[in-house]
Image (cartoon, grey):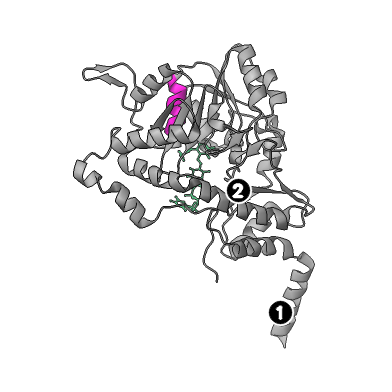
Amino acid sequence: MNKPIQVTRSSMPDFEEYTEEIKDLWESHWLTNMGAKHKQFEATLLKYLNIPNITLFTNGHLALECTIAALNLTGEVITTPFTFASTTHAIVRNGLEPVFCDINSDDYTIDVDKLESLITDKTCAIVPVHVYGNICNVKEIERIARKYDLKIIYDAAHAFGVTVDGVSIANFGDASMFSFHATKVFNTIEGGAVVYKGEKLAEILYDIKNFGITGPESVEYVGGNAKMNEFQAAMGICNLRHIDGEIEKRKAVVERYVERLGSIKGIKLVRPQTGVNSNYAYFPVVFDGYKLNRDEISEKLKAENIFARKYFYPLTSSFECYKGRFDVEKTPIAKYIAERVLTLPLYADLALEDVDRICDIILNYNRASNESNLEAAASLSRI
Ligand code: T4K
């Protein structure tokens, strides 16, 4: 049996590069609480993303949760259910009510044509998701938010390094959250960041991730602990040196998948978005009218030690913890896609021969020939 292939595999610097980077921590004994590595990493990221403000966090989820808290919102937040648990939980854990908008069937981001009809006098914000690194219709979302005076907080967990018409995706909305989790295009082991407009938010985010402490003897917010530590920041410093090369390698993997699966009836891929420089974060495939359904393909791959994932099934609106609260029928496209989507293995060092093997398993399976093989095997055993 071939060695297992998981849906992704963390990018890592050379061992020596990382150990060199963390060496001075043994001299300083300063391991966390916004130390030298944290400051250095923050400054490097500002440059890389070409943005004015960034706050680092210990993970993407707390980055999103703290940002929503920092904006001091009340009421309803429009978002999509075709995402990881984090997006919806971050809204609910802030005491806000998620209102689910459907996604579009092209890139699975929020359907801006359905957004406006969901706005009520209780709506305070929109939390759109750049799902798989596909970019939401940022212009239309901006127009709607301005018209109704709503905040926009992008869940950009998947979108680090993406640009639109040459502009970093970090520049849209009031704030965007990036995840630097081990499974992401760019990782700090665990980690995350928020980028935003306005100095005011900088102060609040800094305090909120550090228990709400604003001075030696003052605590102005009910904050938590969401600080990025020095080892995470050191990993970020190292990985950022290699990010462009990693994205290039991912691109080659995606191109091979597209070459093999791009024109197959019943297999739907996301088309490249106009003006968008992708980070090739995920490779979602929708099996719709193919000879095998999504679950059958998933099982076939598993039998060969290949572990694709059903990101994002089930919809967050159908989670047990939200039972009876939301109606999944109100987001029919999200429901349809979630039932048919499979994200295939994708990481920088995935060998093209492995991509071919994955495609062969998907393409070469033929129910009729498999049945006749089984019959042949059965008659052989009778001899
Ligand atoms: N918003 C969105 C839209 C998100 O997708 C996420 C996270 C967030 C917010 C929150 O960001 P963070 O708080 O996580 O920074 C994974 C990740 O844990 C999660 O970060 C990610 N989204 C989600 C889509 O996927 P799982 O439960 O599927 O991960 P797991 O442990 O099954 O790992 C998947 C594969 O990755 C493994 O089979 C092998 C590989 N892997 C995993 C780990 C942990 C590695 O190569 N190295 C590793 O260290 O959630």
Magenta stretch prevailing secondary structure:
helix
Report whether the residue tagged 1 is closer than 8 Å to ligand 1: no
Q: Is residue 111 above or below residue 120?
A: below
Residue 334, by quadrant, is top right
Place of residue 251 in the rendered image (x, y in percent of width and height, measured from the top left): 61, 50
Disc 2 to disc 1, C-alpha distance? 33 Å
- Neighbour tally class for label 1: few under 14, some 14-19, many 20 plus, Cα within 10 Å: few
* Residue 377, numbered circle: 1
Q: Is residue 9 above or below residue 145?
A: below
Q: Residue at x 28, y 33 (%)?
A: 33
Place of residue 287 in the rendered image (x, y in percent of width and height, measured from the top left): 72, 50
Relative to the observer, which residue lies in front, 304 or 29?
A: 29
Is residue 292 one of those drawn in magenta?
no
Look at the image and tell me in which quarter the N terminus lies: bottom right
Q: Which residue is mark 2?
A: 310
Badge 2 marks a residue whose secondary structure is loop
Q: Earlier in the sequence, mark 2 or mark 1?
A: 2
Q: Residue at x 41, y 43 (%)?
A: 190
Relative to the observer, which residue lies in front, 203 or 305?
A: 203
Magenta stretch bounds: 62-70
Residue 376, by quadrant, is bottom right
Badge 1 marks a residue whose secondary structure is helix
Place of residue 39 in the rendered image (x, y in percent of width and height, measured from the top left): 33, 33
Relative to the observer, which residue lies in front, 184 or 171?
A: 171
